[in-house]
Image: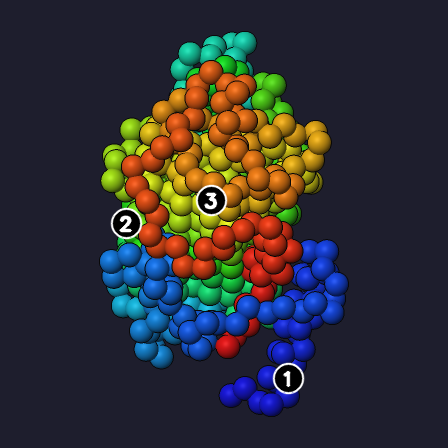
Amino acid sequence: MATASHRRSLRTRRTLVVSAAVVAAGVGAGALVLTANASGTDVYHQTLAAKDGWASSGSGTTGGAKADSAHTFTVSTRAQLVKALGSVSDTTPRIIKVKGTIDANTDDSGKKLTCADYAAGTGYSLSAYLKAFDPSTYGRSKLPSGTQESARAAAQKKQAANIVFKVPANTTIVGVPGTKAGITGGMLQIQKVDNVIVRNLTFSDTEDCFPQWDPTDGDSGNWNSEYDAVTLRGATHVWADHNTFTDAGHFDSLNPKYYGREYQVHDGELDITKSSDLVTVEQNLFTSHDKTMLIGSSDSEPSGKLRVTLHHNVWKGVVQRAPLTRVGQVHLYNNVYDVTPLNGYSLQYSINSRAKAQVVAQNNFWTVPSSVKVSKLLSGDGTGSVAGSGNLVNGTTTDLVAAYNASNSKKIKTTVNWTPALTAGLESSAKNLPAELAKTAGAGVLTAN
Ligand code: CA
Ligand code: CA
């Protein structure tokens, strides 16, 4: 049905969008660089290339590439997305093309839903909740329980029913180029399924209306939220490619404090937990966020899983967990970190290796302002490893582990129990990565063909 003029207008729009992204990235508008699809197939049917990280092992990652026309959908609303996803038990290959931005906080008729809409009828109110669990009267030894906690949980359940999108096996979810495709306020949940591709989508401001107070979390308690923009739980063979993850819409600087602690409405950008395995995360932009990526959610996750490759991603203005790794064999190569404070987000650390994680960090590039010490780029609990070489700080080869260990008592180990083999596209020098990835990483770069 696409007429020539329709195609032309799409093409024009795409060019404008890409130019804007390139300008925003600080690159001259004339240097328009588009990432072509290597395999010659279109953006919707592309599968993960051979040897492209852990997700290429075994049966590889093909997503919904084999979908028939009855299982190929174009969606622009929340209701259409829910319908296209179907039942999580239906493993028929499907391709879901997201056109434009879908607001997860809308009802089936497209009407905007607010936190008050979810709270209605549950009896929850923030002021009553704050009164009920004030540490000066409730103490700090036990988790909230009682009427207001039950009401909070009920309200959260109502929001979850609306904003959590359960992805079945053998699915590709892909943004239509040139449409600013993405999901705002939602969580893609890839749970106990195999073979999923997520690409060319902007995930923004996934927000929990009903954070939970945990007085036992840390020394002073914490407000914790439930939703990640994309969450992998017991998922296998997942390829996340050319997406953008950001809090834009609600930066953490807007969060109030209650009981002296930040009322944190965000959780992870892309969390890979509960024995997820064989994951490749490639050419994404992670930005303007605090708890960016967990690999493993508990120190007691069983060994042998959580094998993840992260390459050619940009981490720009994130506070921590880029990633926080536990247990698994994780390969980080050719990533760019810019730890300059951005939108109120200041670095705690980039990579945390704990619970015997076996991290290989190779040929990555850090841009570090003078306000940040190089010893702050890593973190650990004294049991995790970070091997690998060729990491640059402001262009200079730097031993990140030595810098960390020189000023910390819980030393990071430098040997690992594996050698990465699935390393397609590994570049032997990180030198040119900042300029390269400013043009190629994130959503809005891929073209249809
Ligand atoms: Ca959490
Ligand atoms: Ca999470």
Q: Secondary structure at mark 3?
A: strand
Q: Which three-letter amino acid code belongs to the residue tagged 2?
A: Lys
Q: Secondary structure at mark 2?
A: loop
**Which one is earlier in the sequence, the residue at label 3 or at label 1?**
1
Colouring convention used in this rendered image of the protein: rainbow
Question: Where 177 falls versus 345 (above or below)?
Answer: below
Q: Which three-letter amino acid code belongs to the residue tagged 3?
A: Gln
Q: Residue furthest bottom?
A: 4
Give the residue displayed 38% in from the left and 42% down from the top.
Answer: 330
Question: Where 173 falls versus 155 (above or below)?
Answer: below
Give the residue displayed 65% in from the left and 41% down from the top.
Answer: 394
- The residue indicated by pointer 2 is 192
- The reply to whether residue 136 is in sight is yes
Q: Position of residue 371 (x, y in %)?
A: 70, 29
337 with respect to 234 (left or right) = right
- The residue indicated by pointer 3 is 362
Mark 3 vs ligand 2: CB below 8 Å:
no
Question: Depth check: 142 or 320 in front?
Answer: 320
Q: Which three-letter amino acid code belongs to the residue tagged 1?
A: Arg
Q: Position of residue 105 (x, y in %)?
A: 53, 51
Question: How far separated are the C-alphas under marks 1 and 2?
Answer: 42 Å
Query: Which marked residue is nearer to the observer: mark 2 or mark 3?
Result: 3
- The residue indicated by pointer 1 is 8
Give the residue displayed 72% in from the left and 60% down from the top.
Answer: 27
Q: Position of residue 151 (x, y in %)?
A: 44, 31
